Amino acid sequence: MRKALGVGCIIAEDKERLRKKFEKFKPGTISVDVYQAVQPRLMGTPDELVRKFREYIDAGATHFLLNFPDVTDLEILRLFSETVIRALR
């Protein structure tokens, strides 16, 4: 059986940049009738995200579907791939 996690992801090189991104990209809210939920998200520096993803991997997650709110910034994808993905291989 495969286990997947679909989640928003915010990454930044340091805490100050992360704080600014958090302010810019507030979590979205989903409402259907009386049901309301805030979009789940993982956010942190590369080292923090490696630790968070390892927790999910240790719990059995095998696939991740990520949504980066700043995906048009290719530097973000480079940072994620060269730090987080590389550390998790």
Image (cartoon, grey):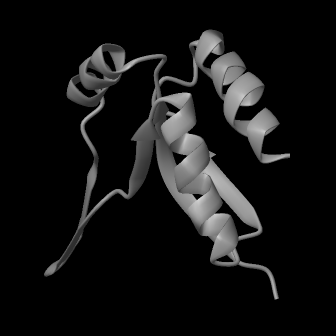
Direction from residue 83 to residue 40 in the image, left or right? left
Q: Residue at x 20, y 26 (%)?
A: 23
Q: Quadrant of the N terminus?
A: bottom right
Q: Is residue 65 above or below residue 48?
A: below
Question: Residue 33 lies in what quarter of the image?
Answer: bottom left
Q: Nearer the viewer, residue 51 or 44?
A: 51
Does residue 62 lie above or below 46 as drawn? below
**What's the residue at 38%, 58% (across, down)?**
40
Q: Residue at x 65, y 13 (%)?
A: 74
Residue 86: percent from left, percent from top: 80, 34
Taking the image as shown, residue 74 lies to the left or right of residue 21, namely right
Q: Position of residue 34 (x, y in %)?
A: 13, 81
Q: Is residue 26 left or right of residue 54?
A: left
* Percent position of residue 65, x then y: 65, 55
Q: Residue furthest left?
A: 34
Q: Position of residue 24 (x, y in %)?
A: 25, 23
Vertical arrangement, residue 13 with respect to residue 66, above or below: above
Q: Nearer the viewer, residue 23 or 35?
A: 23
